[in-house]
Amino acid sequence: MRTGRLALRPVGMGDHAALLAHWTGPLVRRHLFGDRRVSAGQVTEIIAASRRDFAARGYGLWTLRPAFGAERLVGVAGLTGPDASGEVEMVYSLEPDRWGQGLAAEAGRAVLGHAFAVAGLRRVTAEIDMANASSLGVAEQLGMRHRGMGPGGTAIFVIDRTQWIGTRSDRPIRQQNPSPEML
């Protein structure tokens, strides 16, 4: 997939080193994985699970790289699940030097478009650390609605296909000011 500024490619084993570096960066992991360091083995399993999900369900995780120019990984976005309750969750993370540029919302828009138009999902959730004000703002920009609280002080946001269709427009998503919370 492509957006105006991003190339989204399904994660693969060739991305292992870049994903490990990204997810173990202290500013990125602060709001991911319960702020626990991710091991190389866990990254291998995340990649394998995403590959299985693409094969079985038509969705998974994508690497985010600039659409033009450098090939450096700038983040990850995608869909995981379903979990035990049947929910499919949208996830995203960006390298700190890319915070505040509107890329999380741009990637989120592409992921939700794929979820509803390609994968045929009816609903997508996002579990966001309440301390991550910028990610909470991204969910709201995407038309997601706060549904309640999850474990460990997380906010649960949700959007269904009907809401997504109602939020689509040709106007760009506003960019946010850089902040340490922007993932």
Image: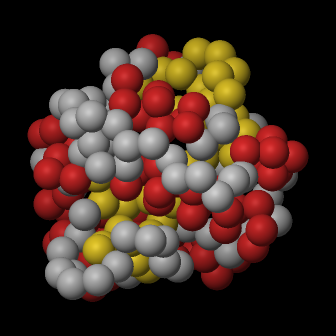
| Spot occupied by residue 98 in the image (x, y as percentages of width and height) | 22, 53
- Residue most extreme to the front: 171
Q: Is residue 23 left or right of residue 8?
A: left
Q: Is residue 54 left or right of residue 41?
A: right
Q: Is residue 152 above or below residue 103?
A: above
Q: Does the rendering let one see residue 72?
A: yes
Percent x, y for residue 153?
45, 14
Q: Position of residue 23 (x, y in %)?
A: 23, 52
Dividing the picture into quadrants, the one containing residue 6 is: bottom left
Circle count: 0
Percent x, y of residue 174: 45, 42
Residue toward you, 75 or 83: 75
Residue 142, picture quadrant:
top right
Quarter in which the C terminus is drawn: top left
Image point 34% across, 19% down: which residue?
A: 131
Q: Is residue 57 visible?
A: no
- Decide: is 133 above or below 3: above
> In screen coordinates, is 41 left or right of 96?
right
